[in-house]
Image (cartoon, grey):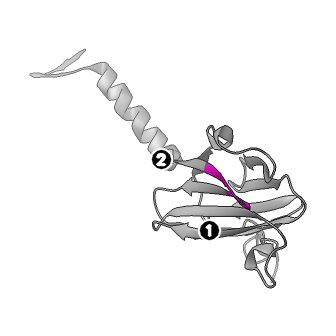
Amino acid sequence: MSVTGRIVIPSFAIFGSAIALILASLGVAEAETARVRSGEHPGFTRLVIELATPADWRLGRVDGGYELDFGRDGVILDTSEVYRLIDRNRVASLSQDSATGRATIALGCTDCHATAVTFRGSWIIVDVTTGAAPPGSRFEAVLADTTATSPLTSGAAT
């Protein structure tokens, strides 16, 4: 303990405050863990991603499944309970890219498609349904890479 005049300041309190400030400046304190729940239903499998706040998310096609972009950094999926209530017939796997934060839903079926909606303002519901996607489904488009650097910001001459 340090004694300064009449005020006693425990040294561990100073150290803890310094660590908290460093972590906050690195953005570590801004990470959000989103629980993923699931359910098996006749004709479809449901994934519910419980975000704390609304997100400008996008769902689109990739080889073998779909990709979900949360529209912000810091979302970390808790997938520990995903396969407690569902099998892998429609959703073969759910993973997250540590570099981009995007989630990949690998399909276990060849004749199925995904749709998604926002629920309760911030939750994302993804349904993987047996059968072909409806004509014109926006979820069948490939997501554009929003992390790419444009020529104007990469230092290229104009």
Q: Secondary structure at mark 2?
A: helix
Q: State whether residue 4 appears in this view.
A: yes
Type of the residue with mark 1: Trp
Residue span colored magenta = 38-45
Q: Is residue 53 magenta?
A: no
Residue 25: assigned label:
2
Q: Is residue 131 left or right of residue 100?
A: right
Q: State whether residue 69 appears in this view.
A: no
Mark sitting earlier along the chain (2/1) = 2
Observer-nearest residue: 155 or 24?
24
| Quadrant of the drawing holding the C terminus | bottom right
Q: CA distance from mark 2 to mark 1?
A: 26 Å
Find disc 1 in the rendering and name its residue.
57
Q: Main secondary structure of the magenta part?
A: strand
The relative height of residue 57 versus residue 37 in the rendered view (above or below) is below
Q: Position of residue 93 (x, y in %)?
A: 78, 46
